[in-house]
Each structure stands twice: as C-alpha cells, then as structure tokens.
Amino acid sequence: MSSSNDTSTPLTSAPTVVTGVVGDDIHVIGIRVLEHALRGAGFKVAALGAQALPEEFIRAAIETAACAIFVSSLSGHAELFLRDFRAKCDEAGLQGVLLYVGGFLGVGRQNWEEVEQKFKGYGFDRVYPPKTAPEQAIADLQADLNRQVAAAR
C-alpha cells in the first residue's frame, strides 16, 4: 500500500518530452541515445534533432504539452543560447515545464560545479556533465514528475 508521500509511484500515462541539440551544434549521438532510452522507459519523445533554436524547443513543448525539455550541447556554446531560456519558457506559459541540460556546456576546461550552478541559476532543474548515463536522467525525470504530482495534491 502506498502513502500519499510515496514518490516511487509509476506514472499512469505516457508523458511527452522534447529533446534536441541547441544552437549551432550538429552532434546528435548523445541525444539519440537518450531519446531511445526515454522511449524505452515509456515516454513520448518529440525529437528536434540538431541545431535547434531555443524558440523551437518552446514551440514544440507547447504543441505537444510536454512535461520536460532535454537540451544537449557538445560544442560548448550552450550558454550563448540558454542564458534566458527559463524566462522565455515562462513567458510562453511553460512555467511548470522541467528543464534539463547536459553535455559540454562551456568552451575550454571549466570547473563542473561552477558550470552546474551557472545553469541552475539560468533556471534549469537538472544539469548533467558529459557521459551521464541516460538512466540517471530518466530516474531524475521520473522523480521530478512524481514530486510535481505530489505537490499538486
């Protein structure tokens, strides 16, 4: 028997997530692996592919009623495109959408903790370093969605 505070309750419907590689980045292997894992975990995936602009992520999230947006970057230019992404999402009516970003998010060698804090400061819910296992992102997404459901009760 589960209590109302149980955050391990499986989701009852297949939520949609938007995925893509931001900006001028053409590297899609990592996001394709994540998309495959998300589908395997029961999520619907609206895949934007490479070189997606922030506005494309937002438009896709609105059109699909997505619960989350996953942004990937390998070029290191993510900051240029994502600094005001949360504000743009909020302006578009996506205040509750979960934001995840991962990959090489800055140019050159950087302290990961500083990069993570920077992107959390930009409004991202989760920030992942390169080579994060898709299972980690999926577990975090499921926990975050369950937390949202519990908070709405």
Image (cartoon, grey):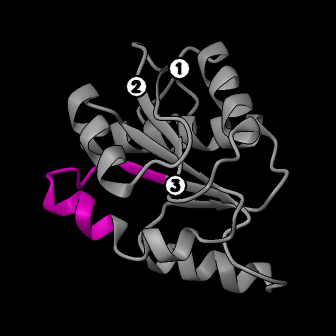
Residue situated in front as seen by the camera: 69 or 24: 24
Let me know if residue 90 is in the magenta part: yes
**56 lies above or below 3:** below
Residue hosting label 1: 10
Residue hosting label 2: 16
Residue hosting label 3: 22
* Mark 1–mark 2 distance (CA, rounded to whole Å): 15 Å
x 80%, y 49%: residue: 132
Let me know if residue 45 is in the magenta part: no
Location of residue 152 by image quarter: top left
Q: Is residue 116 left or right of residue 10?
A: right
Location of residue 145 by image quarter: top left
Q: Position of residue 4 (x, y in %)?
A: 41, 32
Tag 2–tag 3 contact (CB < 8 Å): no
Q: Position of residue 139 (x, y in %)?
A: 66, 37
Mark 2 or mark 3, earlier in chain: 2
Numbered marks: total:
3
Three-letter code, disc 3? Val
Tag 1–tag 3 contact (CB < 8 Å): no
The circle drawn on residue 45 is: none
Three-letter code, disc 1? Pro
Residue 21 seen from this side:
yes
Disc 1, SS: loop
x 60%, y 17%: residue: 39
Residue 153 seen from this side:
no
* Mark 1–mark 3 distance (CA, rounded to whole Å): 30 Å
Q: Is residue 96 left or right of residue 17?
A: left
Mark 1 or mark 3, earlier in chain: 1
Q: Is residue 48 left or right of residue 50?
A: left
